[in-house]
Image (tube, grey):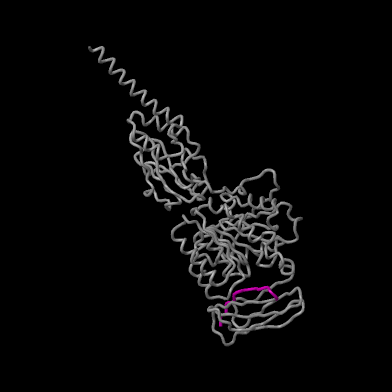
Amino acid sequence: MHDSLKVITTVSFLTRKLSWLAVILGWAFGEIGYSQNFQAFLNRVYSVPIEAKAAIVDSFLAVQESFPVIEKDSIVYFIYTGEASSVTIPSDANQWDTNVDRMSRIYGTNLWYLTKQFEPDARLDYKFVINSSNWILDPRNPNTCLGGFGPNSELRMPAYRFPTEINYRPDIPHGTFFDTTFYSRNLQNSRQIRVYLPPGYPQISDSFGVVIFHDGLEFVNLAFANNVLDYLFWQKSIEPIIAIFIPPVNRTAEYAGNLRGKFTDFIGTEVLPWIFKKYPIYTNPAWHVTIGASNGGNISLWLAVSHPEWFGKVAAFSSNVQTDISSLLATSPKLPVQFYLDLGTYDIALLIPLVRNFKSLLDERGYSITYHEWHEGHSWGNWRAHVDEVLKLFFGKANEVESNKNPVVSDWRVSHYPNPFNSRVTFNIALPAPGRIILRVYNLQGREVANISSQAVQPGTYQIEWRPQTLGSGLYFYQITYGNLRWNGKLLYLR
């Protein structure tokens, strides 16, 4: 009797084991298609006895081709396996909040998962946080992206296209780097400036455009801007240019704080004269570009808006936009500046309205602007992918500056002194061909306060003097028109 019961019990046990094995084999051979349907996997793993769950999970993980698991081009399943009391996913999508996106654990297993939905072309940085304190990369995702605080795991949705131009290509010509320690009289500090000279320099051109990158070393180490430049030169997509990579010393203060004025003077009265003395740079500001991201974008915008005689083009990625930048554009005459702006839809929440409002202001004032919003966050993984677009926009072979390049840069020059001034200011204007000079001065409200000169002239150098005897002290803007060209500048009158 007891032997019969033992046999029955053994058979029952083996039957259950075989049943679980059949379930597992069914999954392994794709009989219920779980590799295409994560929800079907969840339904199944929750429906079997606890003893069968781990084997089903192992089979599921074994056949997945990539992680996170993506279905229907927009549904994402983040997966983590391991013993933990909690797992969260801070990312670009939640402003790196460790308390928002909490993973769920499948009872009876060590598999954790989180379901999200993103645009088919999105790209986001993320990490796992285990037990509220241990930040790790996603162990199953080989895709990572360097950031300011080290590497992050990278979610690439199916329609996202990796920017291959950032890769180093051993089979194409490469530019050269020159590093110099630069002491600033204005800021009373030193920093290492890195200069990129294009392949074939200097034989490839008599003169060059120039681009200044703020957060310069990050644009090299995290955005691989030198690889982008090599690639674009090899493709013959841009004119020959020289790139200057300038790092900050006191970043927030220099780019958006109490040292911004001194940093501005450092760029305009120290760096630019040094560049012009050392390299054959076009003097036309339309061939001078300043680029930055976040607060680096803020200082780039400020330099172009406050000194269009220095920079005729500016690119700002995910930029801060301080109030006085918008105010200056809203109240001054239209400046000869071309803008590139972009933004991540998962960007820092405070920046999104700033950039969108600034874009609206530029549209209202009739400025030339290229604007994009990407399904990405506030990261170098975002910005590195668009350096090539900026360079092709501003220095492309079909660039509209091409027709103005030679006559403008050879002789068209403007300077004025002294500035600030207390009784009179003198403008020196050098012209390469016959034309008409028109010189007007405007107040901060954009109202014309003086029409100093409107005369037809022959090629040569001219001096024009202005004595603002009836005006009060303050900041004024001037604009010199010569044919279809414009030159804008600022004057500080101290009566």
Q: In this view, does 342 lie above or below 21?
A: below
Residue appearing at x 39%, y 26% in the figure: 22
Q: Where is residue 380 in the image (x, y as percent from the top left)?
A: 53, 52
Residue appearing at x 36%, y 34% in the figure: 109
Which range of residues does the magenta coloring cover?
A: 483-495
Q: Is residue 348 toward the left or the right of residue 12 in the image?
A: right
Q: Is residue 69 toward the left or the right of residue 369 in the image?
A: left
Q: Is the magenta stretch mostly helix, strand or loop?
A: strand
- Does residue 191 belong to the magenta stretch? no
Q: Is residue 221 visible?
A: yes
For the C terminus, which image quadrant?
bottom right
Q: Can residue 148 be seen in this view?
A: no
Q: Position of residue 312 (x, y in %)?
A: 63, 67
Foreground of the two, 441 or 378: 378
Foreground of the two, 324 or 358: 358
Q: Where is residue 305 in the image (x, y as percent from the top left)?
A: 57, 69
Foreground of the two, 279 or 175: 175
Q: Position of residue 319 (x, y in %)?
A: 51, 61
Foreground of the two, 206 or 39: 39
